[in-house]
Amino acid sequence: MRAGHLATFANRIFLEPVHPLVGEMVVEVRGFFGVYLLYCINPRYQGRIYIGFTVNPERRIDQHNAGKRRGGAWKTSGRGPWDMVLIVHGFPSDVAALRFEWAWQHPHSSRRLTHVTRRTTRERQFDFRLRVLAHMLQTAPWCRLPLTIRWLKQEYCRDFPPGLEPPLHMPIAFGPVRAVKDTKHAKPLSPEGQVATTKHCSVCLKTFQDGDDDIPLHCFHPTCTMAAHIICLSRIFLEKEPNHILPIEGQCPGCKNLILWGDLIRHHKGCYDNLEADPTSSQKHWADELQL
Ligand SMILES: [Zn+2]
Ligand SMILES: [Zn+2]
């Protein structure tokens, strides 16, 4: 583990409670790029797995289960139904996600994964793919990405192999996720209209312009109004790690709290916006939880 990382395994971030699947809470994420694992539940092919890339997991699983004429892959066509059991998301681009997909599919062809041993005859495909994933999440460049590891189906959840737990800045989340359109000039999601009140980048002090391509990042601490260009904030987060291009954590220039880069990005993309599949009961559900 990286020296100086203040988090410990005990305070690993969980974005949702451990058993939220009963209420079918759906998390919405903008700018979604995910790599998923399918598990075949057809008795004739049970245990087969499939790894794929998607920008829309809900549509993708429907396509797989509808067969290749509806856009499913030929490898999954006619062998369904499949369960989408796990998805890794938070990739900065489709290219980054596609490279991750390729390496997960072909670990023994990836020069980054030469330390991953081959599947033994006793090891189930599912266990093997999880082992490969665990190694990948500890290997550069993936170990520095602000990824979320999300179990989509509770019955498949399991611990990562001992010693191969994902880096502490990657939350393990539970429950369904929904990709929503990334509207380029959408206002970032932030509580109590902080957006309207913050005019300057806290780092370079330049005024934000309407229509800037670089939508500012906002600190998510409730009383903090810090906003900064992504580039500016990553530069100060990387002052102690000049050889890296992707920060892991740093001090908010506003409230001085230590914040994880991945949390900023997830907040920016709406990962903390929890919506329920049935909108009529969503308010009540949250109210109930808050009273506990
Ligand atoms: Zn700036
Ligand atoms: Zn702050």
Image: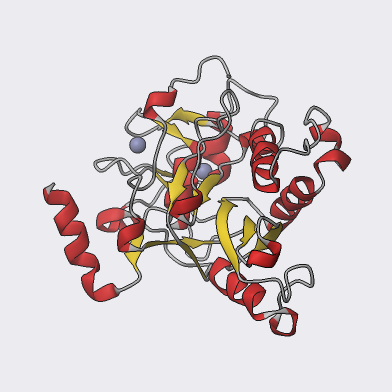
Q: Is residue 280 left or right of residue 19?
A: left
Q: How is the image coloured?
A: secondary structure
Residue 18 visible in the current orientation: yes
Residue located farthest toward the top when viewing the structure as drawn: 3
Numbered marks: total:
0
Residue drawn where x is 23% and y is 75% of the image: 280
If the picture is divided into quarters, which one holds ligand 2?
Answer: top left
Along the line of sight, the residue nearer the viewer: 126 or 34:
126
Q: What's the residue at 81%, 35% (across, down)?
A: 118
Q: Residue furthest front?
A: 44
Q: Is residue 286 above or below residue 164?
A: below
Asked if 77 appears above or below 218 in the picture, the reply is below
Q: Quadrant of residue 258?
A: top left
Left/right of residue 213 with respect to residue 123 in the rendered view? left
Q: Nearer the viewer, residue 66 or 8?
A: 66
Q: Position of residue 68 (x, y in %)?
A: 74, 79
Image position, residue 14 (x, y; %): 39, 41
Quarter location, residue 212: bottom right
Residue ID at (86%, 35%): 111
> Farthest residue toward the left?
291
Instruction: Please name whichever residue, 141 or 136, is drawn nearer the observer in this view of the structure.
Output: 136
Is 271 left, or right, of 35 in this rendering? left
Asked which quadrant contains residue 141, the reply is top right
Identified at 13% across, 46% down, the residue is: 292
Q: Look at the image and tell me whether residue 206 can be seen.
A: no
Image quadrant containing the N terminus: top right
